[in-house]
Image (spheres, grey):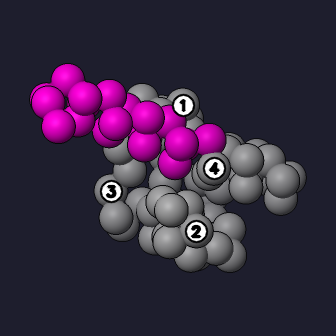
Amino acid sequence: MKKRERDQAHTDWLVMVGHRLKDIRKARGYTYTVVTENTGVPRGPLTEIEKGEREPSLRVMWKLCRWYGVSVDEIIN
C-alpha cells in the first residue's frame, strides 16, 4: 500500500470512528456538555473527534465508550 493510500485509509477510519461516536451520543440524547461533565473529555477535542479531524487517544476512547456503555471494539470495527 502506498503512503497516499495509507493516509486516505487512516482518514477514512477517523471519520468512521467519529461518526459512530456521534451517532451513539445523539442516540442516547447526550449533549456535549453532559458528555464533557461525565467523561472529562473537553468539548473542543470531542467535536474534532466526532468530525474525524482528530485521532482519539486510547484513554479518551476508553472514557467515551465506558460512559456510552459500549466496547472500544464496537467503535473501531
The residue positioned 49% from the left and 54% from the top of the image is 41
Q: Which residue is drawn at 23% across and 35% down?
A: 6
The residue mark sitting in front, 3 or 4, is 4
- Please tell me the numbered disc located at residue 34: none
Q: SS at mark 4?
A: helix
Q: Are marks 4 and 1 in contact (CB under 8 Å)?
A: no
Quadrant for residue 43, please give it: top right
Q: Which of the numbered marks, if any, corresponds to residue 74?
A: 2
In the rendered view, does 10 fall on the left or right side of 69?
A: left
Q: What's drawn in magenta, residue-wise?
A: 1-19
Q: Which amino acid does label 3 sit on?
A: Ser
In the rendered image, residue 26, in percent from the top left (x then y), is placed at: 79, 47
Question: Mark 3 near mark 1, Cβ–Cβ under 8 Å?
Answer: no
Q: Earlier along the polypeptide chain: callout 3 or callout 1?
A: 1
Q: What residue type is labelled 1?
A: Lys
Q: Which of marks 3 and 4 is nearer the N terminus?
A: 4
Dominant secondary structure, magenta: helix
Q: How crowded is mark 1: few (under 14 residues within 10 Å), some or many (20 or more)?
A: some
Q: Earlier along the polypeptide chain: callout 4 or callout 2?
A: 4
Please name the residue that numbered disc 1 is placed on: 51
Measured Cα–Cα span from mark 4 to mark 1: 10 Å
